Image: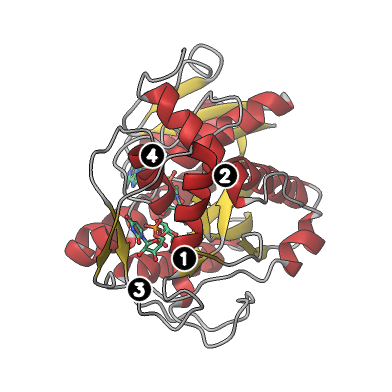
Amino acid sequence: MTIAVTGATGYLGTHMLLCLMDRGEDAIGFAAEGELPPALAGKVTLETVALDDSATLSAKFSEHRITGIIHFAGDGTIPASLIDPLKEYERTLVATLTMLRAASNARCEHVVFSSTASVYGVPDRMPIREETPLNSISPYGAAMAMAERIVTDSCRPACLSTAILRYFNVAGADPKLRAGEAGHPRHLIKAAAQIATGILDEPLKIYGDDYDTPDGTAIRDYIHVSDMAEAHAAALDHLVRGGDPVILNCGYGEGVSVRDVIEAVQRVSGEKLDTMASPRRPGDPPILIADTAAIRSVLGWSPRYDDIDQIVRTAIEWEKKDGGLAPQ
Ligand SMILES: NC(=O)c1ccc[n+]([C@@H]2O[C@H](COP(=O)([O-])OP(=O)(O)OC[C@H]3O[C@@H](n4cnc5c(N)ncnc54)[C@H](O)[C@@H]3O)[C@@H](O)[C@H]2O)c1
Ligand SMILES: O=c1ccn([C@@H]2O[C@H](COP(=O)(O)OP(=O)(O)O[C@H]3O[C@H](CO)[C@@H](O)[C@H](O)[C@H]3O)[C@@H](O)[C@H]2O)c(=O)[nH]1
């Protein structure tokens, strides 16, 4: 089978293509812009298609005889979605609708869809099970919940089997450093890794130190990007085997606070990080930890990098390489 990866030049997309290449699968990248990293360029075809153009995307899916789609096209962060909610809804929903229309036209069979823990809002029970009511507190999470509903409603008439994966906090880089998280230091671990390597010359802001948590800072469930890619491959295998449609949390089931991340970065890098207490960031839940029983039992998936020091180490090594601080 040939697998389409949308959002192919982004963080998850590049790591997914590396995972599929390592498994010997046939994959085609689809992106509106950007390039593949050198480890993929020339080995994986990249189709440049705008994700509001379902006619071109349908034709490309048919031409490449795509049967499975792994959909990552949908950027956005919680803060950006609060600044420009309309853009957030538009990009997320247009990309989802276009992908589904093209998948239906080209008679594709399987879709693995990127969603987020942000769909849950501020649940009152941890860890979070998939049955928890969706109650997002940001346009980012609300747009993703709408996109999930669109996927669920359209899959049966379009004869698509679907897996929706709700990611907790993805971080780190390919352990062979063939790819990493590019772009702005919007995420905590990326920002801390850039400060530890001297790429970013500013204190690390701690957004809220007065949460009702053991050290007062917000708690997240960080998952290594390569474990995420393997979870997608396992989800696609499940659908190809004829498995039922699924919605699954993707995390490790372990809570790590902002201060825990700072300590891990200091431990791994040997550098002391300057920090600055800052107000809570709007749209941030205090604690998000996944219940991972379902993904482990349904997909038989188990993580390889479930240790915050390993995640942080790959993030720091990637920054050194990407920032030209280490031998290329
Ligand atoms: N990185 C995380 O921690 C995380 C956590 C939960 C969910 N997610 C979701 O996973 C998906 C992939 O995340 P990522 O970290 O790789 O993001 P990314 O920004 O690195 O990559 C996403 C890519 O999709 C493209 N894209 C977005 N909207 C598009 C549109 N309307 N048309 C065409 N292209 C479009 C962007 O240009 C970008 O290249 C996103 O939907 C994101 O919201 C990410
Ligand atoms: O410089 C920083 C950056 C972040 N944080 C805090 O660190 C935590 C993690 O933040 P960040 O790394 O920005 O990720 P989130 O905002 O939690 O969102 C990520 O994780 C969510 C799932 O939990 C996904 O839905 C989003 O796509 C993804 O961006 C939050 O409490 C932030 O307030 C800081 O204190 N300082």
Looking at marks 4 and 1 on the same chain, the residue that comes earlier in the sequence is marked by 1
In the drawing, does residue 306 fall left or right of residue 145?
right
Specify which label sits upstream in the sequence, 4 or 3.
Answer: 4
The scheme the figure's colours follow is secondary structure
Q: CA distance from mark 2 to mark 4?
A: 14 Å
- In the figure, residue 272 lies in which quadrant? top left
| Circle on res. 209 | 3
For the point 42% across and 36% down, the residue is 57
Label 4 crowding class (10 Å Cα cut-off): few <14, some 14-19, many 20+?
A: many
Is residue 138 positioned above or below 195 on the image?
below
Which circle, 3 or 1, is nearer the viewer?
3
Q: Residue at image x 59%, y 51%?
A: 308
**Amino acid at pointer 2:** Ile
Residue 150's tag is 1
Query: Is residue 4 in sight in this rendering?
Result: no
Q: In which quadrant of the rendered image does the N terminus lie?
A: top right
Mark 4 touches mark 3? (CB < 8 Å): no
Mark 4–mark 3 distance (CA, rounded to whole Å):
21 Å
